[in-house]
Structure formats: structure tokens, C-alpha cells
Image (cartoon, rainbow, N blue to C red):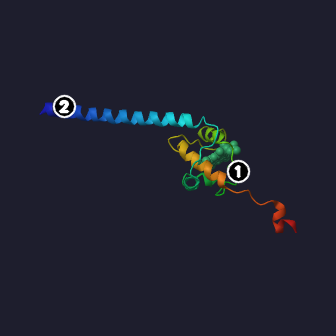
Amino acid sequence: MNRSIANRCAGSAAALMVVACLLFVSLEAGAQSSGSDSKTNTAPAGNAENGKRIYTSYGCYQCHGHAAQGGAGSRLAPNPISFTAFVRYIRHPRGQMPPYTSKVVSDSELADIHAFLRTLPQPPAVKDIPLLND
Ligand code: HEC
């Protein structure tokens, strides 16, 4: 009786170890890939459509505006800062912005958001807005 309980415990402890080990390995792999990604200077292609979706669902728009035009947060587009600087700031903001770690927003998701920001058009020049030229 006691022996079988001990055996069962040993079994579940072993299963836990395997789960913990797998978790550790996958975290390691994630950390490594994010490390190499953020060192690249050229912006990865990214998926602008997904970027637009997560820019909204992750709440970036709440401070930066739906068109990334700025608000409580700075203007992010058009002409977004380089991908390297973008990732660096989001991971380690220096002002009011809350930090987003790679566990919350992955580097590939940031690539998608950056791709979305690159698709935002320049606003028209003042001289092309009739109302402002009356
Ligand atoms: C709670 C408000 C808030 C949220 C949410 C927020 N930001 Fe910010 N962000 C700011 C503010 C304010 C700044 C200006 C600098 C500062 O005070 O940190 C900023 C600055 C930045 C900058 C640096 C811009 C530059 O020109 O240096 C980037 C890039 C940025 N945010 C991207 C994002 C992205 C992407 C998200 C969503 C994942 C996001 N922010 C969510 C408030 C926010």
C-alpha cells in the first residue's frame, strides 16, 4: 500500500522533471533566436497584416494612435525608426512606456508590427489641403 503510493509519487515526479526540462529547452531556444534577431540591422520582412492586428490587440494604439500618428506616446510612423532601435526601445524603454519582454511580444511579432508601420503613408502636404490654404 505505502509502497505503491511511493511508486506513484516517484512516477509523477519524473514526469514533472521531463516537463520542466522540455520547458527549459524551449525557453532557451526562444532566447537564442530572439538574441540573434535583434542584432540584425536590416528590418526583417515581417507580415504587415498581422502587425496591424497585433498593434491593436497588444494595445500599442492606446498610446500611439490607430495610425501610429502619436498621442500620449510618440509618433511611430511614417518613416519608423530602424528595426534594431525599435526592438531595443520596446524591450528597454527609458520614459513612460511600459517594457514589453520577448515573452509578451516576440521578435517576429515586432517584425510584423514594424512592417505594418512601414506601410503607413505620408500625410498630404499642407499645400495640398485646400482648407488650409484659404
Ligand atoms: C501606456 C502607453 C504606451 C503603450 C501601451 C505603448 N507605448 Fe510606446 N511609447 C509610449 C511613450 C509615452 C513613448 C515616448 C517615450 C517614453 O516616454 O517612453 C513611447 C515610445 C515608443 C517608441 C520609441 C519611439 C522613438 O521614436 O524613439 C517605440 C518604438 C514604441 N513606443 C513602440 C510601441 C509599441 C510597438 C507598442 C505596443 C507593443 C507600444 N509602444 C505601446 C507609450 C506607450
- Badge 2 marks a residue whose secondary structure is helix
Secondary structure state at the residue bearing disc 1? loop
Q: Residue at x 37, y 35 (%)?
A: 22
Residue 87 appears at what percent x and percent y? 61, 40
Q: Quadrant of residue 122?
A: bottom right
**Does the beta carbon of the residue at mark 1 sit less than 8 Å from ligand 1?**
yes
**x and y percentages locating residue 113 in the rendered image:** 59, 50
Which quarter shows the C terminus? Answer: bottom right
Q: Using the numbered discs, state the Cα–Cα distance from disc 1 to disc 2 in whole angstroms.
A: 61 Å
Q: Which residue position holds label 2?
A: 6
Tell me if residue 118 comes above or below residue 10 in the rendering.
Answer: below
Q: Is mark 2 within 8 Å of ligand 1?
A: no
**Sooner in the amino-acid sequence: mark 1 or mark 2:** 2
Give residue 119's mark.
none
- Give the amino acid type for the residue marked by disc 2 in the picture: Ala
State the quadrant of the N terminus. Answer: top left
The residue sitting at 28% across, 35% down in the picture is 15
Instruction: Indicate the amino acid at tag 1.
Output: Arg
Seen at 64% across and 39% down, the residue is 84
Disc 2 crowd rating (10 Å Cα; few below 14, some 14-19, many 20+) is few
Q: Is residue 27 left or right of residue 19?
A: right
Q: Which residue position holds label 1?
A: 75
